[in-house]
Image: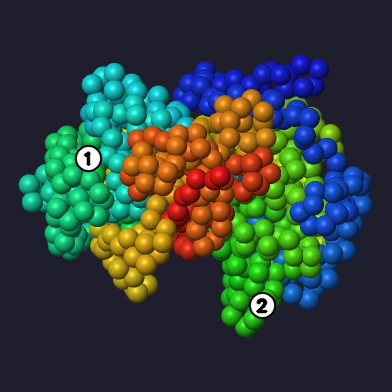
Amino acid sequence: MRVTVKDGKAVKISGDPDHPPTQGVLCTKVTRYAERTHHKDRLLTPLRRVGKKGEDRFEPISWDAALQLAAERLGPIARRAPEAIVPYSYAGTMGLVQGESIAARFFNVLGASRLERTICAAAGAAGLRYTYGASIGMHAEYYEESELILIWGANPIASSLHFWTRAQEAKRRGAKLIAIDPYKSLTAEKCHQHIALRPGTDAALALGMIDVLVRENFIDHEYVRAHTVGFDELAARAAQYPPSRVAQICGIDENVVVELARAFGSTKKAAIRLNYGMQRVRGGGNAVRAIASLPSLTGAWRERAGGLLLSSSGWAPIDGSALERPDLLPDWPSKTPRAINMNAIGDALLHPGDETFGPKIEAMIVYNSNPVAVAPDSAKVEAGFAREDLFTIVLEHFQTDTADYADLILPATTQLEHLDVHKSYGHTHVMANLPAIQPVGEARPNTEIFRGLARAMGLVEPALFETDEQIASKAFRWDDRTLHGQSWDTLKASGWLELDIAEAPLAEGAFRTPSGKCEFYSERLRSEGLDPLPDYLPPYESADGSPELAARYPLAMISPPARNFLNSSFVNIESLRAAEREPHLDIHPFDAKTRGIGDGAQVRIFNDRGSMQARARVTERAREGVVVGLSIWWKKLSPDGCNANQVTSQALTDLGRSATFYDCLVEVEPMH
Ligand SMILES: Nc1nc2c(c(=O)[nH]1)N[C@H]1C(S)=C(S)[C@@H](COP(=O)(O)OP(=O)(O)OC[C@H]3O[C@@H](n4cnc5c(=O)[nH]c(N)nc54)[C@H](O)[C@@H]3O)O[C@H]1N2
Ligand SMILES: Nc1nc2c(c(=O)[nH]1)N[C@H]1C(S)=C(S)[C@@H](COP(=O)(O)OP(=O)(O)OC[C@H]3O[C@@H](n4cnc5c(=O)[nH]c(N)nc54)[C@H](O)[C@@H]3O)O[C@H]1N2
Ligand SMILES: [Mo]
């Protein structure tokens, strides 16, 4: 990003045309980052709660008073039951310095609960880990040379624009683009073909493809022999998923399955852009394993324009131990504090505490996240945060739905105001983020806030007081061969560094699994008592998975991000909210008609967990049986103070214990 500064203010943000992966293009949201940074609602001073929880009544206090108050409240808990203190953080910034560096060290020194992450990607990451050994894949750049691109559970026009540039170039050169998505997203409508399967059935589709690839011999036997484990077992598993059965599970035509497999098997320049939209369901981890098997079966990895990319983040040699310092934990390494799963934070906050759970949660420190808006089963999350006996600190830019429940709000800097280092999950560059302006108001970087908390609590561990520069210089293992000859100084001087990774990185195998091969069959899964082969697991909430529930709540709801929002960030930026207008629900004409719902009607979406209001858009973009509410709205900026997470569930995925936002049955009725 390049920032134009005038009189100490950022006035314009633009992409850097010299940066190879992004080529000077920014997504719509980030072009508004100056508007967001200098927004009239930016939090400028620490605030202390004076009203009831959630009432949004606060008064300004000084930093000294704020840190002292925090220390007075946290200190006794830390001495008595440190695990009663819980951090909550995720995607606000994904910078390595302003994310889990001083923050993680602070919680480690206290012996606080750990947070089991992520709310986003853990099923997919586990799927890749068991299959490839790490979050690695093909280069985004070479998709432009692909002959076939499957855009699978991904909406790149909204969520990863720079990949889309490559896909469009491939299209111009004659490639076929196929979207696999229950919803006709902005991306799906621009592909040559759109396969609108039922949510959560992707593993069945992939297994059906494998069955066809095997029976019609599209297999690269040499690649399979040299670089994979468990072909025969996988083929036997896939034989249980003939196209006719897959068609029924997925709600698509049989010949679509067969043709998709044939297309994929017919060229080695076949590339899958998988993304996290397809793994937010019960079987998300297994689905990623099944799909990740495809390019290893056909040998697509031999070509730089073939293979798969879900995440490239495993290429970056991040030094997690140097950043987070787990060795600072009181009983490291013999014992670690309990982990609270961030996707079930509602239940955790409402838990009275017992032998198994451990102590009741008494304090939450929230940074880089807005759990009251983004975490599932929101009524419980809100009830948890509303507990008068819970002490909550929120580090924020804005008065979010979560900040409303804080006892203490601490104003944080944005990316324009602080120093950071970034990896990417969509390309293979690492980046330095240098401050462009002074902090707005009295805002402080997360690191500085945690240093202040540590000081106020009388902690003396030197690692808590390292500077941002010192931390940044340790973020990567500079001796890794992807970064040879580089250092923090060269990164800072150039702004970014390209990791040195082969053009076709898995052409010769070199997977990072224990066997060094692509593990269709995973011995590790077997030893953990899990299915060693990928399988289709029906969604928790589906006619297959829970017929009784499906009878009461027949519609599957998905709530992927709206183009102009970044999860719940940017929702309060007027120009972007104006583009999204108001919460909508896309519903198929047949489903609308049987419920008496007209286009533009206000509807109530509900299940046993809760309800929300939205304006219906009757459209074939939503397949029959599926409704789509683009998200994530701030509750307080929604007509009824509710958003999609009122209806989503806290159930966890098969692998990775991730969130299941798109595994959610509802009913919809018109409002009168
Ligand atoms: N504009 C914008 N960009 C973003 C974000 C944002 O909020 N806004 N968020 C960022 C973050 S944190 C993430 S994780 C990524 C998310 O971006 P993606 O990984 O692309 O994931 P989603 O947008 O959740 O979903 C992508 C598509 O998957 C479809 N989908 C839902 N369920 C299923 C299913 O069961 N099977 C299949 N095949 N498809 C399904 C959805 O309809 C959607 O069109 O984007 C990042 N980029
Ligand atoms: N229904 C539904 N729910 C979802 C999803 C979905 O698709 N549907 N997507 C899920 C996914 S993929 C994700 S990743 C999560 C994301 O959920 P979160 O991790 O909560 O991310 P954001 O909603 O972007 O909110 C981040 C907050 O961090 C603040 N912030 C940004 N930078 C900084 C900083 O430097 N310091 C501090 N202190 N604060 C900062 C922002 O102001 C913002 O309010 O949501 C999940 N929730
Ligand atoms: Mo995410």
Neighbourhood count class around disc 2 (C-alpha, 10 Å): few under 14, some 14–19, many 20 upward: some
Identify the residue at horizontal 70%, vertical 36% (top origin): 414
Identify the residue at horizontal 26%, vertical 28% (top origin): 192
Q: Which badge, 1 or 2, is on the more N-terminal residue?
A: 1
Screen quadrant of the C terminus: top right
Residue type at mark 1: give it. Answer: Ala
User: What is the C-alpha distance between the residues marked 1 and 2?
Assistant: 51 Å
Residue positioned most to the bottom: 355
Let me know if residue 60 appears in the view: yes
Residue type at mark 2: give it. Answer: Gly
Give the percent coordinates (x, y) of residue 112.
Answer: 69, 67
Q: Which mark is residue 300?
A: 1
Pick whichever, 524 or 257, lies toward us.
257
Q: Which image quarter: residue 237?
A: bottom left
Q: Which residue is mark 2?
A: 353
* Between marks 1 and 2 in the image, the one whose residue lies nearer the viewer: 2
Q: Which image quarter: residue 109?
A: bottom right
